[in-house]
Image: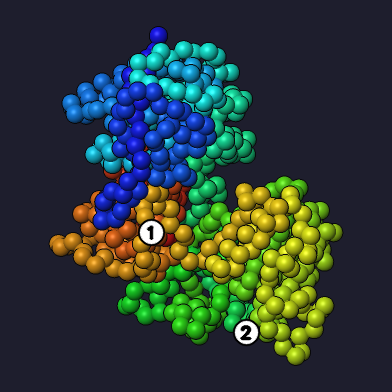
Amino acid sequence: MATLLAVNVGLPKDVSWHGRITRTGIWKQPVTGPRTVRRLNLEGDGQGDLAGHGGEQRAVLVYQIDSYRYWQRELKRDDFTFGQFGENFTVDGLPDDEVCIGDRYRIGSAVFEVTQPRVTCYRVGLRMEEPRMAALLVSHRRPGFYLRVLTEGQVEAGDEIVKIASGPEGMTVVEMDALLYLPGHRRPQLERALRIPALSPGWQDSLRTLLDNDLRGLGATAGNTGLTPAANSPPPAWPGFRPLRVARVTPESRDIFSLTLASTDGLPLPAALPGQFLTLRLRPEAAGPALIRSYSLSGRPGAAEYRISVKQEPHGAASGYLRRHVTAGDVLDVAAPRGTFILAAGDSPVLLLSAGVGATPVLAMLHALADARSRRQVWWVHGARDGDSHPFAEETRALLAELPAGHAHVSYSRPRAGDRPGIDYTAGGRISAQQLRDLGLPRDADAYICGPTAFMRDVSAALVAAGIDASRIHTETFGALSAITPGVLPAAARAPHLPAHPPGGRPGPTVSFARSGLAVPWHPEYRTLLELAEACDVPTRWSCRTGVCHTCETAVLQGRVDYSPEPIEAPAEGNALICCSQPPADLVLDL
């Protein structure tokens, strides 16, 4: 019979790490005597990052003494103590290759249910002083698992662990862990896993995404779509940059203009998806550094040419160069269409909400809906200063007229005397929560929002308040993406910059961060592209930092990467895992 060897608890504390402070509850200490287990936690225990740890589905973490012995041999260590792996229960028995999701156990006076394998996280590596630990737990198939508390009660070291029910489908912790993190996400196994009611909602969502993409026929080049939205789009139509000819330059409003781009050989360009963007490499000075900028596609998806639309910023180097110097017949270096802000197929209503130049990606979506003569309810909601700054006004009216269920609401914050209410615009003022409530937008709609950061934040909150589920709300950011740095305490924001203390020696390849407008020489002392980005205060997204979770998956606009260590599963074609990769040659990343 299995036995509870130790009950381990610990409250979050601040730890110095990589020059920053991270809050973590990974340090656990064994306690004596009975401890109360409640629905959300164990008495005296806490988590530093509730987004990734803790909660009802992850109330108690379990790890086995047999795995302690295994890692002592593998890592040549003899300094382990109970709680070493951040677990609450150290147990004798309950191996990961025998315990199944949905199994139920009585320990002391409490009853538990197995919900999912351990979350891959850098903090177990921090605790173990082994940065690879998150990947090793997965690749060696010894993750440990979480318990949900079905009946609150008391537990203490020495309690017997009694199995009282078996989970349906008999899928072990090891099988479930491999199904999400390792290559080869087979449909029968995905369907089997999704039949287990006890599986935590987060894992269900990830596996359902994998299954949906399998049904869509996406192959191995799609990467792990269950772990990151970065993999949820087709691979780029061509590698790096290719020359495209400027066919037309068209003014759209006072400060927005469009460039229509065509192939140099006269052949149709590969189709883009509605909502994607292009990245341009510009050289205002032949011998000077390149400017790399991304602009949303605003034309009809599937057209033989691409159309991008650009806002002339008052001091914008790239937009100023395009407006003043680029004319029809010029040739520009262009990377293939990319992006995951894509109109999803379906029958649900569609809300297309934008302000200013944010209209561009949702306009491409409106083109796609009109081209298909979609019978979906479609709402076009746009905010502009006045008629002179309102882009695509006639174009959007014509497209909405082609839809049997098209609706429009246009707000002018400062209409001119000649702007006609009811014709040019619907309401005065900025788009507000009250305006959106008054529209009676359908609660089962999928919403796509693009515009200034504050606009997207406020509109998203207003839609949630109006009853639309947050999972249905999608936003597109033109600049740097918001960072994901779990557990790291906030610090004063800094604009991306060259490293304050660059390593000495001969510089290596140039790494360009396209969204941040920064080009930096590589040096092996950085170890990974993630560490280089952090040295430059480029906003990054990560969790495991060792090639497991794919949170750091980033589009490669030009070049390729080498891996050390190798990731558990390769990213989607055209992407890279920056937490474990290095550049062998010049590289352009969509960061």
Q: What colouring does the structure picture have?
A: rainbow
Is residue 412 something one can see in this rendering? yes
Is residue 182 something one can see in this rendering? no
Q: In the rendered image, which quarter is residue 459 located in? A: bottom right
Could you say where residue 456 lies in the image, as x and y percent from the top left? 59, 64
Question: Which amino acid does the dot numbered 2 rest on?
Answer: Arg
Q: Residue furthest right?
A: 404
| Residue 490 - label | 1
Q: Mark 2 and mark 1 in contact? Answer it, CB < 8 Å.
A: no
State which mark lies toward you, 2 or 1: 1
Secondary element at image label 2: loop
Could you say where residue 591 lies in the image, as x and y percent from the top left? 42, 60
* Picture residue at 50% right of the left edge, 78% below the top: 319
Q: Residue furthest top?
A: 1
Determine crowd level at label 2: few under 14, some 14-19, many 20+ residues with C-alpha closer than 10 A: few
**Sequence-wise first label, 2 or 1:** 2
Could you say where residue 53 lies in the image, as x and y percent from the top left? 44, 39
* Picture residue at 43% right of the left edge, 57% below the top: 483
* Picture residue at 65% right of the left edge, 67% below the top: 354
Secondary element at image label 1: loop
Q: In the rendered image, which quarter is residue 239 located in? A: bottom left
In the figure, is residue 562 to the left or right of 46?
left
Q: Is residue 577 above or below residue 424?
A: above
- Residue matched to label 2: 254
Q: Is residue 29 above or below residue 282?
A: above
Q: Residue furthest front?
A: 33
Determine crowd level at label 1: few under 14, some 14-19, many 20+ residues with C-alpha closer than 10 A: few
Question: Which amino acid does the dot numbered 1 rest on?
Answer: Pro
